[in-house]
Image (tube, helix red, strand yellow):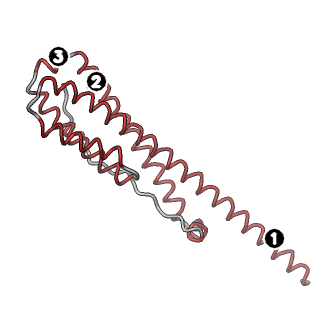
């Protein structure tokens, strides 16, 4: 083989390597944006649930004026949802909001006329639908995170992702509240 043949072979190897790096990098970026989109879906539903909870609180307040601590806890949980900036903070806020939601329903159980209120029933049903949406979006987010983390941590992608310092994303881990659901 001549020097020219070695140059051609070396150039071909470099071109293939460059194309591989480019394709891997773009694939990781697409997956990062998918993870962000899925997180945004969760965040929207958490904020919606927080708003619905405040509407439920307003209705409950008219019936249960002496339940001050429960209302303060709900306000704290709602503010955590509003200030959460990442997955970990959102998961903590989601857990706290679920706990305060259960506390609110302990109060509701003491007021049968409140449970019969049409506005309350409508808000309660919308709240349950939002809870179901959060569970679905959380599952989709965690699937996207799994795909992303697998993509950046498998060989040979690991060589490229280490070069660009891509970091794994955290899963959205919320406490399972299925056994604590309250039905009215």
The residue drawn where x is 28% and y is 41% is 78
The answer to whether the residues at label 3 and label 1 have Cβ atoms under 8 Å apart is no
Q: CA distance from mark 3 to mark 1?
A: 75 Å
Numbered disc 1: secondary structure: helix
- Image coordinates of residue 146 in percent, x first then y, are 46, 54
Q: CA distance from mark 2 to mark 1?
A: 64 Å
Q: Which residue is mark 1?
A: 12
Q: Which residue is mark 2?
A: 123
Residue 47 to residue 183: above or below: below
| Mark 1 Cα-neighbour bin, 10 Å: few <14, some 14–19, many ≥20 | few
> Image quarter for residue 140?
top left
The residue drawn where x is 30% and y is 47% is 80
* Quarter containing the C terminus: top left
87 relative position to 166: left or right = left
On residue 67, the disc is none
Q: Which residue is mark 3?
A: 116
Residue 166 to residue 49: above or below: below
- Image coordinates of residue 141 in percent, x first then y, are 44, 46
């Amino acid at each position: 083989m001549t020097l020219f043949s070695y140059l051609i072979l070396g150039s071909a190897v470099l071109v293939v390597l460059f194309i591989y790096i480019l394709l891997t990098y773009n694939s990781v970026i697409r997956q990062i944006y998918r993870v962000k989109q899925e997180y945004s879906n969760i965040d929207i539903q958490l904020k919606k649930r927080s708003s619905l909870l405040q509407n439920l609180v307003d209705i409950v307040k008219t019936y249960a004026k002496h339940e001050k601590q429960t209302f303060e806890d709900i306000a704290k949980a709602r503010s955590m949802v509003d200030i959460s900036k990442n997955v970990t903070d959102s998961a903590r806020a989601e857990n706290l909001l679920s706990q305060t939601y259960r506390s609110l329903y302990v109060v509701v159980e003491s007021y049968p006329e409140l449970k019969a209120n049409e506005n309350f029933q409508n808000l309660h049903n919308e709240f349950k639908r939002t809870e179901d949406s959060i569970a679905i979006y959380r599952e989709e987010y965690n699937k996207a995170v799994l795909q992303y983390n697998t993509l950046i941590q498998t060989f040979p992608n690991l060589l490229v992702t280490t070069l660009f310092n891509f970091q794994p994303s955290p899963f959205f881990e919320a406490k399972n509240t299925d056994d604590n659901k309250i039905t009215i």
